Structures are given as C-alpha cells and as structure tokens.
Image (cartoon, coloured by chain):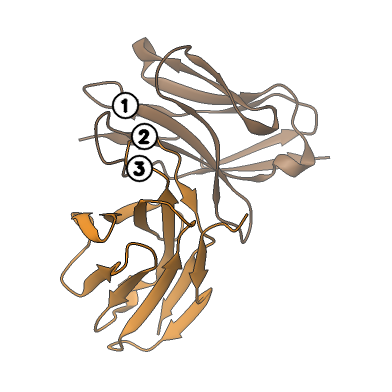
Chain colours: A brown, B orange
C-alpha cells in the first residue's frame, strides 16, 4: 500500500529565507507526485506535480520540487519566502494507471515571520 | 471561470440525523472525487465517480455513507444515522479526464459537525 510522510507538522521561516518542506513516499513502483496548498477557508490548490520527464518540477508562486527515486522523496522548496506563502501544504501521491484517487500526507503548516 | 462549489459550507446536526452534502463540479469534468479531512489530518479518499457511476467506493467507511451522481454532474454525499466521529470537512474534487495524471480541482469543503 502507498503512503506519504511529511516531516514536520509545523515549519516556521523568516521572510526572505529558504522554504523546505519534506515529503517521502512509500510505494513499490514510483507513483505520480503532487503538492497542494490550502489557504485558510479555501480549497486545496495544486502547486505542482510530477508524472514523467524532468525530475525537477516548477510550479506556481515560485515553488519547485525534485523527484528523487533513490531517496523516495519529493521535497518542496522556494528560495525566498513571502508572507503570502503562509498556508498548509500537502504532499500527495497516486498510483500510475489508477483512477487517480490521491493519498495525502498529514500536511505541513508553514508560518512566515516578518 | 467557476470552480468547484460545495453546499452548505457548514452543517451542524445532531447524532443520529441524516445529512446530504452537495458538490457542483466544474462544467464538463468527467471525474468526481469525495474526500474527508479530519482535524490535523490530510484528506482521505472516499469515493470516485466516472460519469454517473461510482467507479470506486472503497474509501467509504461503512454502509451509512452513500453518494450519487445521477446525471454525471452534481453529486450528493449522503450520511445516515450520523455519529460524532463523522465530524470532519468533506471535500469534493473534479478533473477533466479520468487519467491519474489529470489535475484535480478542489472545492472549499463542507464542515460537518455532529453534536
């Protein structure tokens, strides 16, 4: 069975600092990988996804993530945090060839200090 | 354009009551998913529709939960004899196609509280 682990339920960074949110998956076959962001009182919004091809994926709002098969990881980064990045971030996977139901991690709440 | 909408945004009910939660997907989207998000957890899959039929209902926790999508558009999640443990945010998502690479667009959710 597939699973997703997000290290750190809360991450706090200063404005302008590097953002690093960790995600590891467990799957016998590399899945498709997603990062979603949830702002307060809003629905989940897709930041980026990896399906095939280049392992470094660029998303919206300056975020990017790199698929590392050897480490079974898909960490999310942003070089310089902005106050508007404060939100909850979810890593998710779905099995290749499946109907697409997503398996989510527990989420990481990002706080950005001025 | 219009995104996925869910009504009501909040629902408070008493233990043992019946509730219906509605999802309006993006027009033309074939696939529709329901997830449940408990406090402090990520969303958990409940059921998936491809068109009108429930293609996978393996995530429904028990037979008190049922969902329909009679015309392949709007979907209703129905919960009978609600229990306090059913309290959660119920999320609906839709995608244009049925591939696992298709982006799922989420609604804002319905927060269900069972007293």
As drawn, the label of residue A31 is 1
State the CA–CA distance, disc 1 to disc 2.
6 Å
Across and down, in percent, residue B63 comes to 15, 71
State the CA–CA distance, disc 2 to disc 3.
6 Å
Q: Are marks 1 and 2 in contact (CB under 8 Å)?
A: yes
Q: Are marks 2 and 3 in contact (CB under 8 Å)?
A: yes
Across and down, in percent, residue A44 comes to 53, 50
Across and down, in percent, residue A63 comes to 64, 27
Dot 2 crowding, Cα within 10 Å, few <14, some 14–19, many 20+ = many
Across and down, in percent, residue A103 comes to 34, 42
Give the left or right position of residue B37, taking residue A109 as reference.
left
Give the left or right position of residue B38, taking residue B17 as reference.
right
The residue nearer to you, when weighing A36 against B41, is A36
Query: Given the image, what chain letter belongs to the residue carrying mark 2?
Result: A
Q: Is residue A15 visible?
A: yes
The residue nearer to you, when weighing B63 against A5, is B63
Report which quarter residue A14 is drawn in.
top right
Query: Given the image, what chain letter belongs to the residue carrying mark 3?
Result: A
Q: Residue furthest left?
A: B63
Image point (29%, 79%), residue name = B83
**Quarter of the picture holding the N terminus of chain A:** top left
Sooner in the amino-acid sequence: mark 3 or mark 1 = 1
Where disc 2 sits, the SS reads strand
Give the left or right position of residue A96, taking residue A66 as reference.
left
As drawn, the label of residue A93 is 2
Residue position for label 3:
A102
Sooner in the amino-acid sequence: mark 2 or mark 3 = 2
Image point (30%, 67%), residue name = B69
Sooner in the amino-acid sequence: mark 1 or mark 2 = 1
Where disc 3 sits, the SS reads loop
């Amino acid at each position: 069975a597939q699973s997703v682990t997000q290290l750190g339920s809360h991450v706090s960074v200063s404005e302008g600092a590097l953002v690093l949110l960790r995600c590891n998956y467990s799957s016998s076959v590399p899945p498709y990988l997603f990062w979603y962001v949830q702002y307060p009182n809003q629905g989940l919004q897709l930041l980026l996804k990896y399906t095939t091809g280049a392992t470094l994926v660029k998303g919206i709002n300056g975020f990017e993530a790199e698929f590392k098969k050897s480490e079974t990881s898909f960490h999310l980064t942003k070089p310089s945090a902005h106050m508007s990045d404060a939100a909850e971030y979810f890593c998710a996977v779905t099995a290749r060839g499946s109907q697409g139901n997503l398996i989510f991690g527990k989420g990481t709440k990002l706080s950005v200090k001025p | 354009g219009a995104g996925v909408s869910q009504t009501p945004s909040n629902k408070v009910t008493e233990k043992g009551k019946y509730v219906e939660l509605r999802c309006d997907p993006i027009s033309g989207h074939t696939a529709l998913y329901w997830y449940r998000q408990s406090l402090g957890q990520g969303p958990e899959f409940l059921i998936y529709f491809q068109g009108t039929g429930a293609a996978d209902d393996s995530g429904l926790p028990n037979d008190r939960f049922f969902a329909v999508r009679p015309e392949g558009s709007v979907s209703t999640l129905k919960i009978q004899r609600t229990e306090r443990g059913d309290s959660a945010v119920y999320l609906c998502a839709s995608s244009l196609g049925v591939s696992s690479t298709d982006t799922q667009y989420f609604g804002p959710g319905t927060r269900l509280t069972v007293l």
